[in-house]
Image (tube, rainbow, N blue to C red):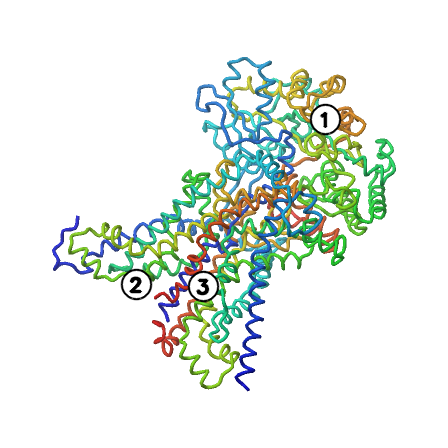
Amino acid sequence: MNKEKPQRIKSVSYSKYGLLFIAPFFIAYILFSLWPLLSTFYYSFFEYVTRNLKTTVEFCGLQNYKNILGLADGERAYFLTYLGNTLRLWILNFIPQVLLALLIAAWLTDNRARLRAKGAYKVLVYMPNIITAASISLLFYALLCKFGPVMSTLRSWGLVGSSSDLMTSKWATSLTISFILFWMWYGNSTLLLIAGMMGINPSLYEAADIDGATSRQKFFHVTLPLLKPVLLYVLVTSAIGGLQLYDIPALYNTGAGGGLIGLPNDTSTTITMYIMRLHSSDTGRAAAVSVLLFIITLIISLIFFRVFREDDGRGRHHKGKKVGA
Amino acid sequence: MKIESDAKLLRRRKIFRNIVLVFLCFLSLLPFYLMFVNATRSSNEIKAGISFLFGSSLSANLKNFASAQVGLGITVLGSMVNSFKIALPFTVLSVYFSALTAYGMYAYNFKLKKVAWGFIMAVMMVPTQVFAIGYYRFMIQINLIDTYWPLIIPAITTPAVVFFMRQYLQGALSLEIIEAARIDGSGEFHTFNTIVLPLMKPALATQAIFQFVFSWNNLFMPTLIISSSSKKTLTMFVQMLTAESFRADYGVVFLGLAITILPMFIMYFILSKFIVEGVSLGGVKE
Amino acid sequence: MKKFFALILALAMTTCLLAGCGNSGASSAAASASGSAAASASTSAPAIPENTITGDPSADGAFVIWGWNTDFVTILEQVLPNYLSADELSRVVFVNAGGSDYYQDKIDEILADPSNDLYPDIMLLEVGYVQKYVQSDYLQDVSALGITKDDMANMYDYNVQLGTDTASGTTKALFWQATPGCLQIRADLAEKYLGTTDAAKLQGMLDSWDKVVAVSKQVNEASGGKVKLLSGYDDLKYIFCNGARTQAWYDENDTIVVDDAMKQYMDVSKQLYTDDSTFNTNQWGTDWAALKDGDGESTEACIAFCGCPWYTYWCLTDTWSANTVLIQGPQSFFWGGTGLAATSDCSDSELAGKILRYTACDTQAMIDINSANGDFVNNKAAIDYIDANGSGTTSTFTCYNDQSIVGFFKDKCEGINASLAKGEDQKICEVLFPVAVTAYANGSSDLDTSLANFKASVHDMYSYLKVD
């Protein structure tokens, strides 16, 4: 198939192969991601009403957006409510997650206090991240529900009242969901931060040692500033993942009947649960919710890339040399 | 004097850190341990409180579980087979086409290369959820709803894997090897399959594990696409554990969860070293 | 740095992806699985097989029937052969949607496409959403199938109402099951805490909501919280939704209406919550189910569950066998039930008419249905016969002192008003209203806020229904 003579070998003459090789990816992406994305935008401008099996579809401009943002008469700002819920669940998990991950990563990379069995430790803390989230959510529910083993034991020790129930409390439910997220993800963040810390030039620490810096000072003045891109990365992926928060709240403490209502009192319903709730009955509003979610995601990634690029530009300046190490 | 107290401090610090780390390990395992314990206890025993000792109701729970799943139109093992039927081709397609795309980006120069690469970077952050509505309706239109195709085909487009593969190629493959292959008269596609792919084995393996796990654990797309009971995946089976036939008995719920978790649990402990290295050591490999 | 970081980025990205960014999956099925609990439970036979098509839908003269489980297969195989010709039977193709989760979605899709081989000639329907189809143009008036008012004379009135479009008065769906509600009282605990196992005395103690609240409080105090009368106020929802309401969920202007009975339900719930006199469980939840087998000393138990014939036969545990007293409680109501209807593009009205007749009208055929699967059938004459001659149920469940189950239920359909039924009832009653009840009961919002939230949520789900 390829009988060119050696002297003709220049990458230019093979450029069509480059295009050929990347073609499947792009064709599939355009067909199965980009087209659906554009059509989601399109659907969001139509009002879908299905009543007694009759569906009417009418162009409605921005009405769907106005409705979900509570800007139209008599409409609730469900999008904002659920965005608030989602952010609450995410923040409650992210802050302790990143703090603990930083601490553990610092410990495990501390050359002075070398800890043993690092490998086993990494394996264990990363594990929850691999296990099916749906099962984990249900597992926590089964353990913590009112007559489940945990609450029964607490009751019999007299630590909680006979009628106490985590599932009827907004904060107990939020904190538990956030804890599950935290528990599943801090191992992942730890591993990333360790990788980031290992990339820091040891000579910087040596220099700090010579200057008589304490561990604490080294951490705050050497490690943390140099870790900024990784931290930023952890923040952004976690935020984007957090905005899509679905299977844990959807399986943890939800109302009956398939309404995807996060109990108690709709306080643990997330945006993607809302999309799912609407997806077959009200395509237009579901699409509008998706579009707003897309826009928020886009803003977050743009900020990230901007900050990252700046940081990288500065970074190359004075720490570029140690990369290969 | 100072050195001595330093050593003491260091030792104390080490002990403290070890305690915390052991506690965190314990925390990682505890829910799973309680799950396995409770899978062997009867509903009333579970209701009475936590136990760390295995019970004797495993066979009773198994029997109840078997009869509870009769009404669902799919068994837990059937759902595992279904998940496997999706995850395996998904993994193969994802790893192969990502490697192909990455190689195309790495080994060739062509006009739109920069644009194409920028595009891949840009879409890496776009979550599936935001176009799920359009995707769902598109699958209805082309009559692929309630089949496995919509769950497998998108494997061709996994930007993050492409990204990883290209970074890997930059470190692992020198263009001279390709030139040499050309001189030997090897076709481009042939070169990719017989020379480049074997060179990428470590990256392929790591990504294959991750892609398999991703597909296996995915709940979002199957829920959207699959409606027949007999086609439900394992994660969809987990959802059905919330149905009344299972909820009737704590022991059965825990047993069901244990069964659904077991495959990933075993896989993780077999491949854990590999996975953890893939996550954490990849960065320094270069 | 860039390269290194890019690699980390890629790695992390993929691990994030791989681990699903865990949170990303979607699971309407989860919710609908738990949600459909009530719906699927109302199908009495415990076995739901694979999603299957029995017969060849592309054959000439194929007559397609849609259902979501094998309930109807029993009738098809054991009852209808006595009434239909072999030729007619051989044309019947049964499509089992394999569970109620997606039944409506699937059927809705195919109803729009009469040219499809699988287009139903007859479809099965559940009470919670039957009105959605009755109010549509997709079902046929039974009179067009040769079924007269006389043929329906033996049906319980409420079931006729459920299958009738009130505006036009045309009946489109017929039910073969009747599902009058009751309270099931656990005899051993009733003896201990209520001092009697006599059905009439128990009924006297529990025939109004004030009494239910008072007795609940008294039982809770007497048992130190280990035993309560009811597992949760959520159990009461069908009593109020399907029995006590005097107004539909929305009026002729499509304005959402909350009936006074539903407000009473909220007050009763709040009282029960305040007194701590139920376990506050949700129906079909794990906690709820766990209460069935409690011994009342080391583990929590409750005395009463809301029930109906299929529930009594199939959903109570061994603890309750020969240990259950059936009483009406404060209010008559219905819970669940399956019917069938012919579609507007039905290929053979004559056969459809026959199947409807011998599933839901003919007394002897309905006695046969009872012999085949034990259904409490929607035919007064058949029930009289079964009451006198014994039920054919395959359930081995018995009541305390051999109280007759059929005998108890036979007059419990009287006074049920189902003319308020709407197509949205199931979602409103099972999904949306319970949120408002719980919020008000546990004090997280006051009455007005709870009701406003509820109305907003109804409007959110059904945008054509308006908040006043």
Is C346 situated left or right of C405 in this image?
A: left
Q: Amino acid at mark 1?
A: Asp
Can residue C398 be seen here? The reply is yes
Q: Tell me the subunit letter for badge 3.
A: A
Q: Quadrant of residue B126?
A: bottom left
**Vertical side of C168 occupied by A226: above or below:** below
Give how far across and how far down residue B174 sits, in percent: 25, 62
Quarter holding residue C428? top right
The image quadrant of residue C39 is: top right
Going 30% across and 60% down the picture, which residue do you hit?
Answer: B169
Residue appearing at x 39%, y 52% in the figure: B208
Distance between mark 3 and mark 2 Cα atoms = 25 Å
Q: Amino acid at mark 2?
A: Gln
Q: Residues within 10 Å of mark 1 (few under 14, many from 20)?
A: some
The residue that label 1 is drawn on is C157
> Where, quadrant-wise, is the C terminus of chain A in this rendering?
bottom left
x and y percent of residue C448 in the render?
Answer: 73, 53
**Residue drawn 36% across the image and 47% down it:** B92
Name the residue tied to disc 3.
Answer: A301
Q: Which mark is residue A20?
A: none
Q: Amino acid at mark 3?
A: Ser
Find disc 2 in the rendering and name its residue. B170
Q: In the rendered view, does C400 fall on the left or right side of C336?
A: right
